[in-house]
Amino acid sequence: MKTGRMKKFDTIIFVVRYMKRLNVLIFILIGVSALLLISFLILLFQNITGISIGNGSENPLLNESKFFVLIIGILIIPFFETLIFQALPFYVINKLIRHKRKLWMFLIVSPILFSLNHLFNPAYILATYFGGLALALIYYIGYYRKENAILLVAVIHLINNLVAFIFRYLIGS
């Protein structure tokens, strides 16, 4: 008989195996949808509780011109963040840890590092932790799909940032 902990692990393994068989465009669409769902749930939580993650004014990048934000925040930063917060921890954990639970270690370390890069306020750190968790899981699945996990995660992150840019600068103005 399996324990509750084993059932959860089996569920994650099932999801990973299922995601490995998907077309790459569907995989990217699911990844973007996951990040947008997380953003929606955070906004819903914010509206229900009144706890604010801020309006972005704490982020020095958003005080720059729209063109600068577009180039740096959408085209460049997702690639660097993917290298630093998903690829590097994955590589280090795979090289240093010889335990079969290194996936869990990666899914703990990577989102923490990702969220600590977004130190705009405590609520925003918590919000970006969940986005970082989704990106870490996407990286893991992408790696085992034998595809360029760095490119997959960076493109998904880029699309998420582009949607945020559109809502902030084009729809919000």
Image (cartoon, grey):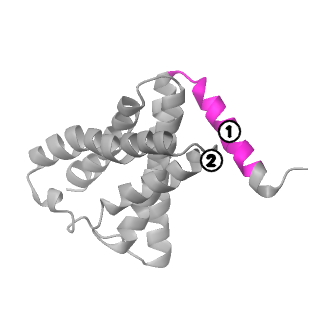
Q: Residues within 10 Å of mark 1 (few under 14, many from 20)?
A: few
Q: Is residue 77 left or right of residue 9?
A: left
Residue occupying image coordinates x 64% and y 43%: 100
Q: Magenta stretch: residue 12 in it?
A: yes
Quadrant location of the C terminus? bottom left
Q: Which residues are magenta?
A: 7-23
Front one among 71 and 108: 108
Q: Which mark is residue 123?
A: none
Residue occupying image coordinates x 79% and y 57%: 4
Dominant secondary structure (helix, strand or loop) of the stretch shown in magenta:
helix
Residue type, numbered disc 1 = Ile
Q: Residue furthest bottom?
A: 50
How far apart, in angstroms, are the residues tagged by discs 1 and 2?
Answer: 12 Å
**Location of residue 136 in the rendering, given as x and y in whole percent from the top left corner:** 47, 45
Residue receiving disc 1: 13
Mark 2, secondary structure of its residue: loop
- Tell me which corner region of the image, top left, top right, bottom left or bottom right, holds residue 71: top left
Residue type, numbered disc 2 = Arg
Q: Magenta stretch: residue 49 in it?
A: no
**Location of residue 138 in the rendering, given as x and y in whole percent from the top left corner:** 49, 39
Residue occupying image coordinates x 48% and y 77%: 49
Q: Is residue 106 left or right of residue 69?
A: right
